[in-house]
Amino acid sequence: LQVARGMDPDEDIAVIQEVRKEVGERIVLRVDANRKWRYSEAVKFACGVQDCNLQYIEEPVDNEDDILKFCEETGLSVALDETINQIMENPLQLLEKFTHSGVTALVLKPSVLGGFENAALIARWAHLQGKSAIVSAAFESAVSLSAYVQFACFLDLQRAETRKLMNEEPPVSTAAHGFGTYKWFDEEVTTEPLSFRYNPKYNSVVADAAETGEFLRQLRINPRMISRTFIREQVKDYSIPVITDTASLSIRVLESAKTDDDDDDDNVRGNLVVFLHGFLGGSEDWIPIMKAMSTKCIAIDLPGHGGTKLEHPGDVLSTDLSIPALVDILCKVLTELTLPGKKVTLVGYSMGARIALYMALKHTSKVERAVIISGSPGLIDVRERALRLAKDEFRARALVSNGSQFFTDTWYSEHLWTSLRNHPHFKQLLEKRSHQTDLNTLAKVLSDSSIGKQQSLWEDLKHLKAPLQIMVGEKDPKFRKIAHDMQKQIHQGNDSSSAAVVEIPSAGHAVHLENPLAVITAIRHFI
């Protein structure tokens, strides 16, 4: 029942008392205030309904800092809803302050929380704390509600398993979830309606997970609901020929799908966001992030990687693949894709970050802003540079002589990748990257673009003109320090430039793979 819609809590108290009187004690009652009461009003309501046996009240107060005080003073159980919906990142950190036993339920709207994975994470926390996880619909179609029913069934089974592992009694009953919104629509997107019905065995309205599964398999879209149809490539895949002083290359480019507004030539050939991968990576690494951007994006395969090829592979030893040379290649690609005078936004990771930073510093007329992810301006100490160059040249020889499988296994066994190794898709990533084909070019890139060979850019940072976002994983202490040192150096030399450090939670060095949602959010805010 909705409360806090009138001017006086006394009206709500009278209504709840009358409803309880009419339905008896068998019916479970919940109320939802949607944060509309001041603390004193919420307490007044709680005192007035003490004998009404409410299961809980959702969001009783307008200030979340008063929730626990409300629990202590009134003894009325509370459910969180809007409090959870406002969590942008790292939900478990915020929820830690709501372990109080008075908070008995968490209401989860997957469409608001960012999907089933986030909702399942919060539900798992709730179950471990002995709290209920209630799945609730917003304005969902029958298609979404069917998936929600199956998700709720999964959470109920998980809850029972959690209690079993904790040597607790199984739940007395399954949770009552919030799927009543299916009645709010005059028409449905499907030809057949979704069926929820009263079941006398359970004395409640029941949604059957098996039935909704079959509904999803058999669904037909109501043709009267279709306003238009279209088929469009999600990502375009093409190559651009590039000739440098030392080589001819075919550069593979992935381009995110155009919008309807892209018919304007100025829009098509400008305002690009350009994504640059790291060593052993590829343009495909960026597809999930590119699809989430509301602007035109491209990602390229750097030489030695993916679909980018030397036209004459036998010339690889004489080909310059240093960072300045890679920047020159990138500039030639952008000349083909943008109008004269148009600037781009660069997003680079690791080796790609060094390319992006070099270009932002040395080619200011082409770069509007840059995102540096797990990147470095280089090494200042001459001895450190010599040691790193020797190490990378040894690695390059090992790559050619031992093959990509052995090299990749060794590469990702290093401490830098500890966090990535815990990623659920790490084995698939390792398998894909262990099948590199152009080993000679890849080895040449590793040697030529070594941070030991690259010119240090630390002093150049003082003269940076373009806004910079320096992104780093919270589990990557080495590059966190580098990021903050870069920020200090930039601000020390140039008050007019802006450099913001963004630490991505629950991520190590491979930030864009370990927590892409947070990376998307940060980039979108920046551009």
Image (cartoon, grey):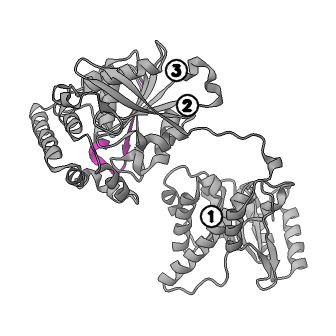
Instruction: Give the class, few, some or many, for how many residues have Cα within 10 Å of label 1's Cα (few <14, many ≥20).
Output: few
Instruction: Give the class, few, some or many, for how many residues have Cα within 10 Å of label 2's Cα (few <14, many ≥20).
Output: some
Q: Which residue is mark 3?
A: 269
Residue at the (76%, 83%) spot, across then down: 202
Please tell me whether residue 518 is drawn above or below residue 485 in the rendered image: below
Please state the horizontal and vertical placement of residue 57, each as a whole percent of the image: 72, 67
Query: Can residue 182 be seen here?
Result: yes
User: Which sits in the foreground, 87 or 72?
Assistant: 87
Tell me the tag on residue 69. 1
Please tell me whether residue 469 is drawn above or below residue 85 in the rendered image: above
User: Which stretch is magenta?
Assistant: 467-480
Q: Mark 2 is on which residue type?
A: Thr
Please state the horizontal and vertical placement of residue 199, each as a whole percent of the image: 80, 80
Residue at the (38%, 51%) spot, across then down: 507
Secondary element type, mark 3: loop
Q: Which residue is mark 2?
A: 295
Q: Quadrant of residue 43?
A: bottom right
